[in-house]
Image (tube, rainbow, N blue to C red):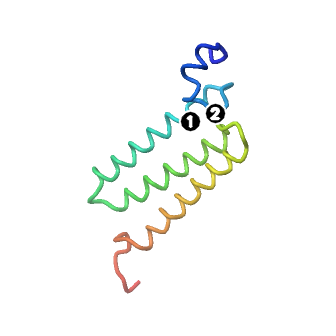
Amino acid sequence: MFYFYEFRIKWGAAYKDLSILDKMKLFFYIQFIIRRIFYLSIAFYLFENSTFQILFLLYSSLAASMYVGYSRPKVWWRHVWLENINEWFVFMITFHLVFFTDYIASASM
């Protein structure tokens, strides 16, 4: 299906840098959009509970990193590496929220 010339001319930009030989790799942009919607829902529906906000952000970042590392959806290895580094930074920044938010019960600890 993806090798038909007319299809590639019309829809080729949607999967330009993706490896198109596996369905799991083609799911990359869909999971990217779902994660962004998930981030927005965390921000708007869990605004009173910062503990669950942090936990859900940590787990979603970890799951995305595992998906990118396992499926390697990009054609070039540098893009896969860049996606994993990006997820690692998001994970570490979110992990630092544990120490710098209201998650800590008392400042004297």
Q: Quadrant of residue 92?
A: bottom right
Give the number of the mark in front: 1 or 2.
2
- Name the residue furthest right: 77
On screen, residue 34 versus residue 5, left or right, reads left
Q: Nearer the viewer, residue 80 or 96?
A: 80
Q: Is residue 80 above or below residue 46?
A: above
Residue 10: name its quadrant.
Answer: top right
Q: Residue at x 64, y 14 (%)?
A: 5
The answer to whether residue 22 is above or below residue 88 is above
- Identified by mark 1, the residue type is Phe
In the displayed structure image, the side of residue 51 where residue 81 appears, left or right: right
Q: Position of residue 18 (x, y in %)?
A: 63, 33
Q: Is residue 8 above or below residue 72?
A: above
Is the C-beta separation of discs 1 and 2 under 8 Å? yes
- Quadrant of image for the N terminus: top right
Quarter occupied by the C terminus? bottom left
Residue at left offset 67%, top offset 45%: 80
**At 71% across and 48% down in the image, what residue appears?**
78
Q: Nearer the viewer, residue 85 or 107?
A: 85
The dot on residue 28 is 1
Give the Cα separation between the discs numbered 1 and 2: 8 Å
Graded by Cα atoms within 10 Å as few (under 14), some (14 to 19) or many (20 or more), the crowding at tag 1 reads many
Residue receiving disc 2: 18
Neighbourhood count class around disc 2 (C-alpha, 10 Å): few under 14, some 14–19, many 20 upward: many
Kindly give the residue lying farthest to the bottom in the view shown. 108
